[in-house]
Amino acid sequence: MLKKITKSGQILALITSSLVFAQAGNVGINTPNPGSTIDINGSVAASYTAINAASYNLNSSDFHVSYNGTANAIFNLPAAISGIGNFKGRMYTVKNNTNFTITVNPSAPETINGNTSITIPSNQSAQLINTGLTGANSTWEVVTMGSSSTGDYIIVKPNTVQSISTGSDVAFGSVIASNNITYSAGVFNLKAGKTYVLRCQLHATEFSLAGGFFIYEWVDASNNSVLSSSTTGVVDAINNYPATTIGGQPEAYAIFRPAADTSVKVRLGGAGTAQLNAGIGFMSITELEGGSGSGTTIINNNITASNGLSMSGTDVKLGGTLSQATNIATGGNNLSIDGSGKVLIGTNAVPAGAANSKIVIDNGITNGALQIKDGTQQLGYVLTSDANGLATWSSTVTTAFANNWTAYSGTLVNPFTGATGGGNLATGISVVIPAKGWYFFRSGIAINSDCNDYTFYINGIGDVWKSYCTSNTAVFMTPRDQNRVLYFSNPGTYTVLAIKTNGIIPGSFNAGNPSFYLDFVKFQN
């Protein structure tokens, strides 16, 4: 239950912070006999402010501020004042009515309980009081923080007979109710900074010794040391002990507040052997309502760490084991891992030779440690880089020419029918390059013409066939069959164009046998 400070003197310290009374003695309102500096016999009201803005500066007019916005918010506390105007004792209550988080910041270098800020989770609140200090001090203290919540608890009972002797641990097997306390084979796991009530009742039969008995206590499961607050429970052979013998005490009780996460259990001592009753007895642990003992009362301290997080006391940090499949949706935001450290996958030790590596993948002796799919992957391809370090998959295998030639696409048209010369003449054909690399081209065409130069080329790459003027009378241009080596930095479809140097129109075009051909093959990246 939320413990909110409502003492009238504390509230009035804020309401009347700007008033100075010169008189001595107490002041009574609606009472003739005030028992305190200010004694109010009636109701008290203070400022209530509701805001939606994601950024808010608390001021001297505020007392209770409720946030109803639609995003994470920043609340800034006023800077402390030294001397006249010092507002020691001023109190603020900040209530978060949203599913977002409020961060409360003091004015640097001031602190809140020694911290540069505090956060108020969704649907919780915090109450702060000014200490009157200035500078790099705890200018503000947290009075209360949290919301009402059910504490941790667990109760287990036996579900079968358990044979016991000296040094046995109680291992009841039936958990009948639990909240936030894990249990396995008699061991309970408790969180640091919380206060627990531990109870155990045992009943036994089948004692091997007449007048036999067993004692039991709550112990630290890691070393079997008895908890300092544990009482001792006793079970004995009721039908056999003499009339002068003390009877059983069927409960071990402890109040325990671990400084670090601790596992506890119930351990037996005594003499002989016996059997714990299969239907009578229990072990239970219940968290007491309370706080961390550091000046802040944490009501909602029902917190655990899982799924990649670990917890020590109130410190939750990365470093745990993933307990479920986890997806990080970046929502268009960058996820950065910065600093001088490394990202190690499959190992927690930097291997030899990786001193300058930022990412290390160690898959032991199993292959397939890395998979990259970007649409360029093919069987036998390797990852290659461009000048900017951008990697794609490509082949480094030399292609056998005789088996892998690719012809041009389209239908050839005569590009040399114009009465003038020039370039960018349409040929109607193109070549489809499947991947970047070096390609071997071969081409041939029969053109009968007076003196002129004729060229087939790919813009920005190079020519694939070219003839030169060798006669002022009509002849076939030579050489007819030509080879080229061209480099393509990107895959794609490339148009083949033509050039002629003057306006002469060939007497015949593509009149040879065989007719025009243009094909190519990749031979190197």
Image (tube, rainbow, N blue to C red):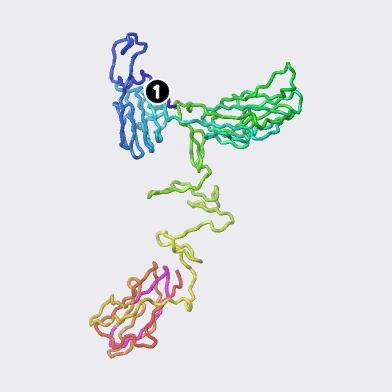
Res 350 visible = yes
Q: Considering the whole magenta stretch, tell me its main secondary structure.
A: strand
Res 119 visible = no
Q: What element carries label 1?
A: loop
Image check: 448 left or right of 257? Answer: left
Please identify the quarter of the rendering in which residue 137 is found.
top left
Residue 362 position in % (x across, y down): 55, 53
Q: In this view, does 378 lie above or below 22?
A: below
The residue carrying pointer 1 sits among few (fewer than 14), some (14 to 19) or many (20 or more) residues within 10 Å by Cα, namely few
Please identify the quarter of the rendering in which residue 134 is found.
top left
Quadrant where the N terminus lies?
Answer: top left
In the depicted view, which residue is nearer to us: 154 or 348? 154
Residue occupying the far bottom of the picture: 473
Residue 289 position in % (x across, y down): 49, 26
Q: Which residue corresponds to mark 1? A: 5
Please identify the quarter of the rendering in which residue 95 is found.
top left
Tell me the residue at 63%/29% (across/down): 281
Residue 392 position in % (x across, y down): 44, 62
Residue occupying the far top of the picture: 33
Is-magenta flag for residue 340?
Answer: no
Amino acid type of the residue that numbered disc 1 sits on in the rendered structure: Ile
The span picked out in magenta is: 429-452
Tell me the residue at 46%/76% (across/down): 404
